Amino acid sequence: MGIAEWREQLRRGEVSARELTDRHLARIAAVDPTVHAFLEVTSERARADADRIDAARAAGEPLPPLAGIPLAIKDNLCTKGIRTTCSSRMLENFVPPYESTVTERLWRAGAVLLGKTNLDEFAMGSSTETSAFGASRNPWNPDRVPGGSSGGSAAAVAAGECIGSLGSDTGGSIRQPASFCGVVGLKPTYGRVSRWGLVAFASSLDQVGPFSSSVADAAELLQVIAGEDPRDATCLRAPVPDFSADLESPIKGLRVGLIRECFDQEGLDPEVKASVLAAAAQLEALGCELVDVSCPRFNDGIATYYVIAPSEASANLARYDGVKYGYRAPATEAGSDGLAAMTARSRAEGFGEEVQRRILIGTYALSAGYVDAYYRKAQQVRTLIRRDFDRAFESVDVLLTPTSPTTAFPSGAHAGDPLAMYLADLLTIPANLAGLPAISVPCGFDAQGLPIGLQLITGVLEEPKLLRVAHQYERAAAVMATRPEAALVA
Amino acid sequence: MAEGNRAEGKGAAWEAVIGLETHVQLGTASKIFTAASTSFGDDPNTHIDPVVCGLPGTLPVLNQKVLEYAVKASLALNLQVAEHSKFDRKQYFYPDLPKNYQISQYDQPIAEDGWIEVEVAEKGKETYLKKVGIERLHMEEDAGKLVHAGSDRLAGSTHSLVDYNRAGVALAEIVSKPDLRTGREAAEYASEIRRIMRYLGVSDGNMQEGSLRCDVNISVRRGPDAPFGVKVEIKNMNSFSAIQKAIDFEIARQIKAYESGEPVVQETRLWDEGKQLTKSMRSKEGASDYRYFPDPDLGPIEVSPEQRQSWLAELPELPAAKRHRYAESLGLSIYDARVLTDERPMAEYFEAAVAAGGDPKAVANWVTGDIAAHVNANRLSISELPLGPAQLAEMVQLIEAGTISGKIAKDLLPELLEKGGSVAAIVESRGLGMISDPAAIAAIVAELLAAHPEEVEAFRGGKNKLQGFFVGQLMKRTGGRADPKLANRILSEQLKG
């Protein structure tokens, strides 16, 4: 059941917000010991939120659009008075004195906060295994990763622990876990959604977006969180259209581009490829025209990303120095060894291995003598990738690719091989580099019963078209009707 | 060999090459990237917020007033304002820097390539004009302040405390070209920068409170054709005279070092005001790598030609233009023009009095003399003086017209400065008008001569000096109201007999 149906039931009093919340809290209690999607469950706050909605309804007050809808929030979005850890020892006890813009908008719209979800430390990873507080598991198969970095938020929706959730996507951190967990994950246009209160990883790439079990729900959630914000200078001042209004408009005649370079990947799983090509055929059956397009620089995205993102991260994470807040290493037995040493030890002990690796890569890429060869070169390639997309959108409306080259891999599969892990984001990174909106929608299952995701990409601020194509594909394909049994999936 | 050794080439006289980096705190009410107050001198850490402290998830947003002030400052310094510029992150770890990077402008500053005209005046030397080039002006955020317990520096302190009240206050960094040659020129340049900023109202330029801070780069060489010597940076001067003295000390120190074959090393030195000397703080060899890159949290800075034009139109007449106008059109001395234009309120007071009909030279004398003395002694603002410019003009006109004497005016001034009022009305009501009727004066003179027959006798016997005695007596009898020229003439006639 989707948000619109729940809203109707709540309005008609067929279910109370308190019942809906309690049902999800019970589900969390039942499955989360295995899934470990949540770092913190805010039961008291959730029940209080829900009771307030029920009281408002009882008093005959008009209910806001997400009234009583229980949601989960990735733990790199600041929640006032509630710990926001980024899954890092560094921020293990950090309680923000302010609320992120996106969550503030959700609470104003009546949504209920169930809790904060697990992620790769500081959103750096593709499996949620780099969390300092334990890995999350894939509800379709607990031996598999849920993807990352927003693995907790994706798994929570897949396992029925919440109706929807928020994640953040820097190189695929919403779409790839959505694909691995068989849910919908939307990365909006860069600047469509405010970053105020999102703990920065790579500021020019980070974007907040929703997870949901349907495209229609993704549209509902985007509706609430999107729009300009005077607290974020990179947030666009574009008007926010009604994302749900156009979902049913005809898609007949739209040109869907298959990016040749994506399908020629050596590492592309044949089952994934077949499933995504079948999805393309489904769109053709809906009246779309399939077009073969080339984005020659598409595969350079990953190298470009792994220079730009760590460079920005190395500066963004410099503030964690043990001085003002966050983890501070205890003094040595010999007593104080000075400020610089305290900062160095705090960072060495407070950050995990992957975060330290990226800080080192970024620091190196920006250093005198290397900045031209790495950071500036990467910026140039970024421009070329953006131009590839611009050219492609001259002849097509939507681009289609697999979301990830593979389905969910086994836990620990890439331990000790960061480069293999980085390749998981190969197909999602270019949309971040170009600032384009992109969505992952389930399109099938592999032989092991693991979900496969289809990625659709449109031009800047074309979310209405993106959501329309995704929604009509979703309905026509009815992928979830063919789903295999999985104990942890709702 | 080090570059410095080439500066030792024999022959020509030593010449210093000096450039200044001036940090001006822009006087906006809130900080450069957030709404926290910029108020100075309050309890530590009372003007902070999550953005100032660099808490996770916070973002900077440019205060548009800061941009306006920076562009106006740039236009006043004849700089080329960029239509597109950007902010960069300058990275280094230090606890006064909450994010461990400073948001600054690196390779695309808001403005580049300008100049100002500086009037260099020194006792015993002829005043001259000097055009000083300005490399660039860029915007950046100030850092917080460290308070070291048990020492005035980090070294030797038991612990240190951080006050972030200053963190995030907007700065304009103004970098001069290496066009300055003496301590005096540098001090005049810095003081002209301060004057311009105060005229614009973009900064109070208070050096004691740190709203204006100068770092000096200085080297010496054998004449203008020799290669540059080794550059030394001097910090910690909090007055213009300290800038001058620190530079003069440093020039002498460097010349002496070269001449005695000691190395001059690239370093930062601190001016010690107590001991009146510079001392080494840290070596600058192996320049720091700040790993600059564009700040992705802040979009491009755009200043359209229309915006630039409208800010340009809002600029007041600047001190140099005023100095020229006062000297050339109003016929004032260079000295008077300089004193009158030092602060904008005084210049405006002067101009208002002239506009109200006062003779420029006479008004200038009153303003730079008794009025300035009164204002300075009582720490008043000239714009709030009870004696308004129109009243001063009236007084000057009354003197000029012969209605009152200069002496009467001087006697009346303390009361006017305290209470204001119409000078003509006071003169009228108290009968202070000048006696300029020849018959009336002749009668008084006749009485006077009759009362002092011995002195008249002595005068006629050749004691000419006694003329002064009679003038004094005459002024005494008239309460200073006798027209001095007329009185002298009539007195001379009657004394001759």
Image: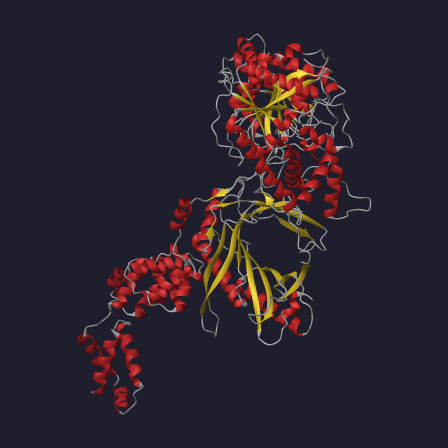
Q: Position of residue A131 (x, y in %)?
A: 72, 29
Q: Position of residue B429 (x, y in %)?
A: 25, 61
Farthest residue toward the left? B439
User: Would you say residue B371 is visible in this rendering?
Assistant: no
Answer with the quarter of the image where residue A214 lies.
Answer: top right
Q: Position of residue A331 (x, y in %)?
A: 78, 43
**Total label count?**
0
Q: Position of residue B388 (x, y in %)?
A: 33, 57
Which image quarter is the N terminus of chain A in?
top right
Near-viewer residue (A207 or B169): A207
Left or right of B183 on screen, residue A130: right
> Height in image: A70 above or below A355?
above
> Height in image: B367 above or below A166?
below
Near-viewer residue (A182 or B37): A182
Answer with the quarter of the image where residue B237 lies.
Answer: bottom right
> Height in image: A119 above or below B62?
above
